[in-house]
Amino acid sequence: MINWHSVLFLLFSLVTCMFAVAVVASSNIVRMAFYLIISLGATAGLFFLADAAFVGAMQLMIYVGGTLVLLVFGVMLTAQGPFVSMRTSGGEWVLGAIVGGSLLALLLQAAFSVEDWRAAPLPNPWGATVAANGLEGTVIVQAKQPRQANGDPWEGTVIRFQQEPESGKSLVFYPEGGEPLPTATQWVEYLNQDPRFSEHLVAALPDGSNGSAPVANGDQVYLARRYPRTDERASGIGLALLGARPDAGGSGQGGISGYLLPFEIVSIHLLVVLVGAAYLARTKRRVTTNGRSPAAAIADA
Amino acid sequence: MAEHLSLYMPEWLAYTLAALVHAFLLINVIAVGALFFIWQERKVCGRIQDRLGPTRVGGKFGWLQTLADGVKLLSKEDTMPKGADGLLFRLAPYISFCASFAAFMVLPFASGWSAIGTTIGAFLILALLGLEVFGVILAGYASGSKWSLFGGMREAAQVVSYEVPLGLSVIVPVVVAGTMDLSAIGDMQRGWFTNWFLFHDPFTFITFWVFFTCATASVNRAPFDLAEAESELVAGFHTEYSGLRWSFFFMAEYGSMFLVSGIGVVLFLGAWNGPIPILEPLAYQTRGEPFHWGGFVANIVGVANFILKAVVLVTVMMWVRWTLPRLRIDQVMKTCLKYCMPIVCFTFLGATLWSYFVPGGLFLPPAQPYGAVRDHSAEYIRPPLAAGLTDNAQQAPATEPSHHAAVQPAASQDAVPQVAGRLADGPAREARP
């Protein structure tokens, strides 16, 4: 069993972080830009993984395809010689560490002060609850089985009823506080009318059983609902990035319930990167080329 | 596809298999496409220059010539200049190729047949295509050679400029269609060829030519191939490359030629729909069915249609290449900023006004997207979950039955009308096997 979601999340987040570190550690400007491309590209991958395809495409279009091309272009136009590498003085390291460290502390604080993202409200309100409640005998909820209807993939759950040998009772569905429903058709109708289930349930069908006869051993019911649309899933996270938390049901504490602050801080971080790149590209005195002295390099240029 | 496979196997395996199959098919589209297009380019070039082109390898027409060249390239030494930046020099061809390959994942080859069916296809494909320039820039920089550096800088300037009119000209059909879903845009143009967006109104007609010009420029083809101008820069950004790495640049180039032609076909030239709706009845039968031979056959013919149209566009690119002389860099910029930009801004405005005041095509009213299939707008308006009930359903309801029973009647009254509506169409649709 591989949970691809986790695997890909780990992969993308690792790539993002590693190459972000590589940007800082490298001393060659164009390589830095290249590492930044990979880091930002992997961030776009994280967005795709969160089903926010539009944000991911924006990330690719604006930061990777737009800003970084300009950045590389600018570096190539202004560089004093091939393969410019920079030497950083101790003071700059200290200053950089202070600024970067405080930014990191701010980000961490902002990120961890936010409530965790809960599972979306869409998942299965009817799965195990229906099955376990009010039924005599064992209910086996089989694996989710997608089917297709009207061109849409529908996600469904097959529930198969198996009589326990020792009980000997027929299978009857007892709705809470209601009359027992002996036939499959009846309780399929019930499922369709109960708002807990019908909200996302498109159809519940007797599957391979005679609908009007009492439910027998081995009967199956197919509960179908539409897959949550990509847009619906994305809009939740999109709203969270703007500060609202649809998943928390409006119970967010105080003003910082969404991800607005971390999101904005990250975008400021990108601005800082741009300013830094411009500064590095136009600086003349600190540049050495291939180990030669600065004076020789400038004289060459 | 993953959904269908997961009927028969665990989900993680189904998704892995589906991903592998899609990747395998697309790699083959690019590789075989490049083999064919290189051969075709030689024949076209030969014809235009009044000679024969390859004639011997593989019997008639020299159709195996590219394969022979491929074997030759494989056996060549992989050289790298001493002054090069090794890491970037080695990686650059793969960046180009990967960007071109990634963009193919969004391209639909027939109704719904794309590796990734996303609702923002038109936007995503442009974003991915824009990444290809990195390969060229980095190759130019990392080679440590003046010719390469000049090539890379020209490419950067050119691509950054041409991305603007290219993006705007893609927006025009998106405005007309009202969606960025490439598959839906293709479905809208079904029916007679007058439904193609090319003939939708005068503005889309003009836009197509601007799109084609900008697409040619953005994939770095003559007369816009300043990055490799062999009369001035030896071979431009790939001067220092040899063997397999060099051929990766070539595959990327021919891959993106086919790709931009495919985008043009989907957006303007009716996508996979033929000029005459012969197979329309077959395609209609697929609606509401998980799998239908009629729809399958219609889609296969659609793929053939699509590839044929795209190959025609690629051939036009070759024809242009061997006909027109290369532009100077100032002429390239002039074409972009003085001609393409104003024209496409004008057509964008015109197409917007046209779709507002004259909703419909020039000849026939445009076909709507298949309503049952892709119109999800109704789903967005959805009554909120009855208050309190969600929590009860999620937390073990057996522990507090009284509370549950008390809340339920009130909520079910709310929900009855829409449940009735769903009962009316939901089970009826699903129950017919």
Image (cartoon, grey):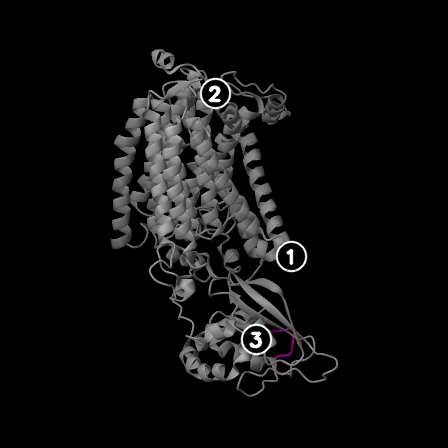
- Provide the residue span drawn in magenta: A206-212
Residue A287 in the magenta stretch? The answer is no
Tell me if A215 is positioned left or right of B333 in this view: right
Q: Nearer the viewer, residue A124 or B103?
A: A124
Which residue type carries mark 2?
Ser
> Are the two marked residues, 2 and 1, in contact with CB atoms closer than 8 angstroms?
no
Chain designation of label 3: A
Q: Residues within 10 Å of mark 1 (few under 14, many from 20)?
A: some
What is the quadrant of residue A95 in the picture?
top left
Say which residue appears at 32% left-offset and 29% top-offset.
A279
Separation of marks 3 and 2 at Cα, in angstroms: 66 Å
Q: Is residue A130 above or below residue A262?
A: below
Chain designation of label 2: B
Say which residue appears at 33% left-offset and 24% top-offset.
A283
Tell me if B165 is positioned left or right of A232 in this view: left
The disc, 2 or 1, on the residue closer to the chain's N-terminal end is: 1
Query: Percent from the top left, x then y, of residue A225?
Result: 52, 67
Secondary structure type for disc 3: helix
Secondary structure type for disc 1: loop
The residue tagged 3 is A130
Residue B230, visible in the rendered structure: no
Q: Nearer the viewer, residue B46 or B18?
A: B18
Tell me if B35 is positioned left or right of A101 in this view: right
The residue tagged 2 is B143
Tell me if A163 is positioned left or right of B65 in this view: right
Query: Percent from the top left, x then y, of residue B281?
Result: 50, 57
Q: Main secondary structure of the magenta part?
A: loop
Which residue type carries mark 3?
Val
The residue tagged 1 is B10
